[in-house]
Amino acid sequence: MVEARISRRSLLMGGAAITAWAASPVSAMLRTIQPGRDAAAIDALIGQMTLEEKAGQLSLMASAWGGGVATTLNPAGDNGSFAAQIADAVAGKLTGVFNGNGAAMALQMQRAVISGSRLKIPVIFAADIIHGHRTIFPVPVAEAASFEPSLAERTARVAAFEAAGAGIDWTFAPMVDIARDQRWGRTMEGAGEDVLLGRQFAAARVRGFQGKSLSDADAMLACAKHFAAYGAAEAGLDYNSVDVSERTLRDVYLPPFKAAFDAGALSTMASFNEISGIPSNGNKWLMTDLLRGEWGFQGFVVSDYTGDEEMILAGFAKDRRDAARIAFLAGVDMSMKSGVYVEHLPGLVRDGLVPQALVDASVRRVLAIKARLGLFDNPFRRIDLKREKARSRLKTSLDLAREAAVKSIVLLKNDGNLLPLAPTARIALIGPFANAKTDLNGPWVVYGDNAQAINLATGLTEGMAGRGSLAVVAGSGVDKPLAGGIEAAVAAARNADVVVLEIGESENMSGEAQSRDEITVPAPQQALAEALAATGKPLVIVLKNGRALALEGAVKAAPAIVVGWFLGSEGGRALTDVLLGKASPSGRLPMSFPIASGQEPFHYDRKATGRPNPSGDLLPYKTHYRGIPNEALYPFGHGLTFGDIVYSNLAQNSPAMAWDGSLEISATIANRGRREAEEVVQLYVHDRVATVTQPIRELKAFRKIRLPAGASEVVSFKLRREDLLFIGTALKLTVEPGTFDVWIAPSAQADGVHGTFDLSAA
């Protein structure tokens, strides 16, 4: 029976548990352990453990007492009762639980383990803190649109502050998978299609989650996931196979992981997919040879939810025992949810199929990180019922959520300067999300509450402050029409000066297991847009989305289009800030919006091929689909401001870069508009001839600048030979002398200003 309320007696017992822990021999032995010091104390503890207890330290379970929507995201299945799970923890059969019910749950379990277990090894509490705990920030791909890694570091810091206050030691984030097929639902969890942006946001989020020290009471262990190449799943289908070359792995999919580890991430999660026929959970080259051998990773690897066991149905393991053997020998330290390690690892060791030394090494890694988290010093470090509430949804946190949401919004189109709208206008706000109480926070929110989030109707009502008028009509369901909905929407539009139509995806259309075969606006909403466009009233499209969309018909033709994403707690207010001009849009697309769904997978840094279509008309026998060019409708890096931004005057300090030197490249960026604007200035390079063909463009640097109306600024970048490296024929980083194109431009498809330089030989 779950204790839903924490009584005074329970609190006193918690205090007794702390006292018992402080006096225990294990505490005396381990509480002073610091990274790289006193490893002998951990070895001494391992020497006291049975094989069953060691397997328990390598086994993680979903909490039987789940928090929020945790039981929907991760069904409890055979978890049994919370009391039974506590008994397992006391018996040493598990290392911790995830997605539990906050500090109340953690207090009961940790108290029982410290009071009653044989070795009193603290359990670890984990959770999916993907884009916020109680304060919800924009989904990660939206936040990447800010092109401000420091913003992601700040939001991750607040997420850790709140979550650690609720007893959470470890988050299953950041997701650092590069996503180049927008049909894949988990696009929303990452930073988009670009490697440089992915690397910078991966490192920033790790720094934010982990803070100054893992032992701090407001820090959480980060977990870079999903290792590796999950974003390359065939056809964008979740859990599907991946077949990429080692060169592509090293060039595209591995660098964000390396950036996360270099930033201090000490856990990583094995991906569900296979790579070239070998499941990641059973891939020794990936998990041991590369990760530990080549990269020197010192943390631990955890399987994804039953990922090790799933090698059976994949045809790689014959049964659960075989799956445990394969995964463990490959280098997966910890098994999540399947239970195969606690069931079979001791027997595999006794039968000589798994060396005990390897088991000890994995246990050592897990215990060392528990020590770094400060759990051996104080197992209740992050468990405090008063602190949990006191840290939740502070004004400063909500202010940051609003700032992050504003900076995530992307203005795709603004014909005739339709935006910003006057707060005195008669606005018809239409669409299934306009006044919704759901679909506000976005996918993968375990502890947030949509009821506390601000929708657009609320935001506009506040922002207009009684000026003008606001009529709110749903007009359609998300994927089903409403009886009389279009008629009511058209009537509202005819009585308005302008129509704001909020359409797109519901929360359950993005995220895990939400791959889409067509990434278009659902048909009933598209029909609504067509009817509203026919009224002739100015139409502003506000998209709710967790991926790039293929826009069609009246949506594509609308004079103004805003990418509104899933913006979290303050989304409605942030959208209002931009729509009414209180804030200038500054977001840029972290992935390309294709002309049609059938172009996917699509990414800006593709290869030219031997038959590129020249600029102009589509020619036969060239690289393009029938009737459409091989380019994006809205490319990576695209986004407009309320200013009028002009690029000019490319300058280089030399026509050539010395092998061990650098090259300075600059351009003048001017705002000829009447409003202040923020511009993301982007530097792209193309290696014309190489022993491995190179992308048509690659982002090498970017800067975000603020330009008052009428102002200009010279923006400079410095390129070095290291910025031009690629994975060569020997599968090692290399670069070769030759000629390079360079652009300083507002997007991956824009000309901006263009020049060339030569890299001299050594």
Image (cartoon, rainbow, N blue to C red):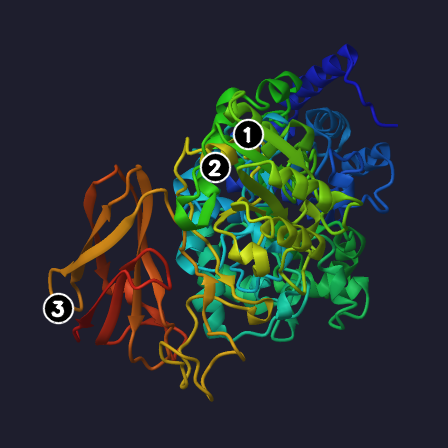
Which residue is denoted by mark 1 in the rendering? 460
Neighbor class of circle 1 (other Cα within 10 Å; few <14, some 14-19, many 20+) is: many
> Viewed as shown, does residue 436 lie left or right of 579?
right
The x, y position of residue 395, in whole percent, is 51, 20
Vertical placement of 422 versus 476: above or below? above
Q: Which mark is residue 579?
A: 2
Answer above or below: position of 399 versus 730.
above
The image quadrant that residue 663 belongs to is bottom left
- Which residue, as the protein is rendered here, is positioned at the far bottom? 621
What secondary structure is found at the residue carrying circle 2?
Answer: helix
Residue 474, numbered circle: none
Among the two numbered marks 1 and 3 on one chain, the one whose residue lies closer to the N terminus: 1
**Residue that badge 3 annotates:** 655
How far apart in space, not on screen, are marks 2 and 1 (Cα)? 9 Å
Task: Name the quadrant of the C terminus.
Answer: bottom left
Residue 591 percent across, percent down from the top left: 48, 58
Out of 173 and 744, give the one closest to the viewer: 744
Disc 1 residue type (three-letter): Leu
Pair 1/3: label in front: 1
Tell me the distance, in whole angstroms, between the alpha carbons under discs 1 and 3. Answer: 52 Å
Looking at the image, is mark 2 or mark 1 earlier in the sequence? 1
The kind of residue tagged 3 is Pro
Compared across the picture, whether 621 is left or right of 550 comes to: left
Q: Determine contact: label 2, label 1, CB under 8 Å.
A: yes
| Residue extending farthest left | 654
